[in-house]
Image (cartoon, grey):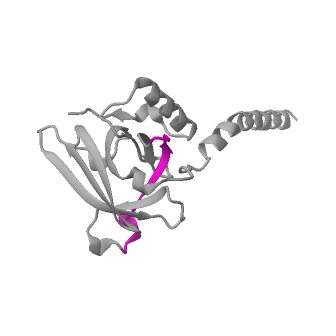
Amino acid sequence: MIFNASLAICRGFFVVLWAALFPLASFAEQPVKSIADLDLSRYMGTWYEIAKLPNWFQRKCVQGTQAQYKILGPQKIEVTNKCTTATGEEIKAVGVARPHSSGQVAQLEVRFAPDWTAWLPLVWGAYWVLDLDSEYQLAAVGDPTRSYLWILSRTPAVSASQYERLLLRLKVMGFDISKLEKTRQN
């Protein structure tokens, strides 16, 4: 009898704990969504990296990270990323982006591997525009797994209030904004 009562208490505790944590678990499991509409021609041009989640392929970049986008055709965008290393060397990577199979214009795939590898699904990475102001001046780009995130601006700096408002929106999307690294400009 005591055993059954203890078991019931333990079950009750876990039910209460699960109920308390369920809203948080379901929030974290909400899928990442891109913006609904994107005018690709307005999005083209130079963007400055303001902050990013750390990633292995930018490990040598210490300042002045920029991205340049240029439409090459209806299904092809040239992507040129560059940054400066600690020794002052400029690193440049040229790749291509294409629409994602979802058909949503703000969901792209990007590849920096050689052209002959384009048929391999693993060489393509998600590039989703997650947030964009109406003037096309401040954007957040990431992926559906929340592993990657960049805050981009048309200018090398943004106001603190703009930045903080964007961080709040990204936090609501489930991104761990505490891990963001601000990018030093030249």
Identify the residue at horizontal 77%, vertical 38% (top origin): 15
Residue 76 is one of the magenta-drawn residues: no
Task: State which region is magenta.
Answer: 119-135
The image quadrant that residue 154 belongs to is: top left
Residue shown at the point (37%, 75%) measured from the top left: 119
Dividing the picture into quadrants, the one containing residue 59 is top left
Which quadrant does the C terminus fall into? top left
Q: Is residue 122 magenta?
A: yes
| Name of the residue lying farthest toward the right | 1
Residue positioned 32% across, 36% down in the render: 155
The residue sitting at the top extreme is 160
Q: Could you say which is closer to the camera, residue 10 or residue 144?
A: 144
- 122 vs 176, left or right, is left
Query: Is 171 placed left or right of 117 in the picture?
Result: right
In the rendered view, does 52 fall on the left or right side of 82? Answer: right
Q: Nearer the viewer, residue 104 or 54?
A: 104
Which of the two residues, 162 or 32, is positioned nearer the viewer here? 162
Vertical placement of 170 versus 57: above or below?
above
Q: Is residue 56 above or below residue 121?
A: above
Measured as percent of width and height from the top left, residue 117 is found at 31, 72
Write the residue at 54% across / 35% down.
169
On the image, the x and y values in percent for residue 137 come to 41, 40
Query: How many marks on residues?
Result: 0
The N terminus sits in image quarter: top right
Q: Is residue 118 above or below residue 3?
A: below
Residue 127's spot in the image, x, y percent?
A: 43, 55
Residue 56 percent across, percent down from the top left: 30, 48
